[in-house]
Amino acid sequence: MEDMGTIYDQCVSRAELDKQPSDVAAMFNDVAERYDVTNDLLALGQTRLWRRAVVNAVDVQPGQRILDLAAGTGTSSLPFAARGAYVVPCDFSIGMLEVGMLRCPDLPFVAGDALRLPFADAAFDAATMSFGLRNTADAGAALREIRRVVRPGGRLVVCEFSHPTWRPLRAVYSDYLMALVPGIARRVSSNPDAYVYLAESIRDWPNQAGLADLMMDSGWNSVQWMNLTGGIVALHRGIA
């Protein structure tokens, strides 16, 4: 794993679509303090609905070990803990983890890169990754690495921005991403340029069927997806 202290010391206003890990981590370090507030605003209040859908898709049971990748400040991990699971929030942004440890001191935050996870084989009953897979330099390699740490028969749920299924919504959404999101971010975020990258990365991401194919090619079985908010977000579920 790349030295996390080195990453945190860098100052990168935004990442590019080649998604170099050091650039992406440094960019998230820069927006960590106001990340949750900005996301709630840009998502028009839908983030809680999406988090609830992820927990339901995992079908978490008390006592299960859950890996929450790209967990950021831990807001996506709290619902699993509330259901009695042992959840490990993992992220490669030290800035996000530091904010999370202050806000959620009972969660066992771990620094880790999805391409080289610091966990043993088959260590978890399930894994989730919300709005993080598209920020990896190699999504297929990340999916294979997640499969390594999930036990046979365990589950992966990926929550990610996708492609609206209704054509008029698709056009409006594209305009919102590329015009309004950076404009709103300039008012509320500490690093508005980061949200230009985030909008570009969403537009560049494969559609629902494309991500399902990638998951199956990476060794996940019985892959299915469910659209949320008209396909703006999709949940993909696979079995190890």
Image: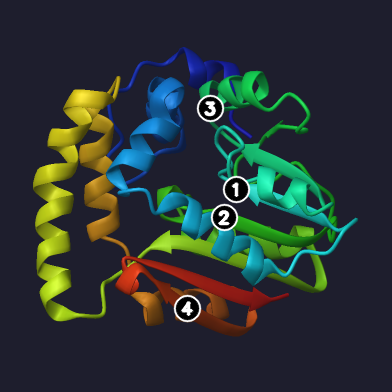
Q: Could you tell which of marks 4 and 3 lies nearer the N-terminus?
A: 3
Crowd rating for badge 3 (residues with CA inside 10 Å; few <14, some 14–19, many 20+): many
Gap in angstroms between the C-alphas marked 1 and 3: 15 Å
Please report contact status of discs 1 and 4: CB closer than 8 Å, yes or no. Answer: no
Q: Are dots 2 and 3 in contact, CB under 8 Å?
A: no
Callout in the foreground (4, 3): 4
Q: Which mark is residue 96?
A: 3
Name above or below for residue 122 compared with residue 154: above
Q: Which mark is residue 114?
A: 1
Q: Tell me the quarter of the picture where residue 121 sits.
A: bottom right
Q: CA distance from mark 1 to mark 4?
A: 23 Å
As measured in the structure, the alpha-carbon distance from the residue carrying label 4 to the one carrying label 3 is 28 Å
Q: Amino acid at mark 1?
A: Ala
The kind of residue tagged 3 is Met
Q: Which residue is mark 4?
A: 226
* Local secondary structure at mark 4: strand
Q: Residue furthest right?
A: 63
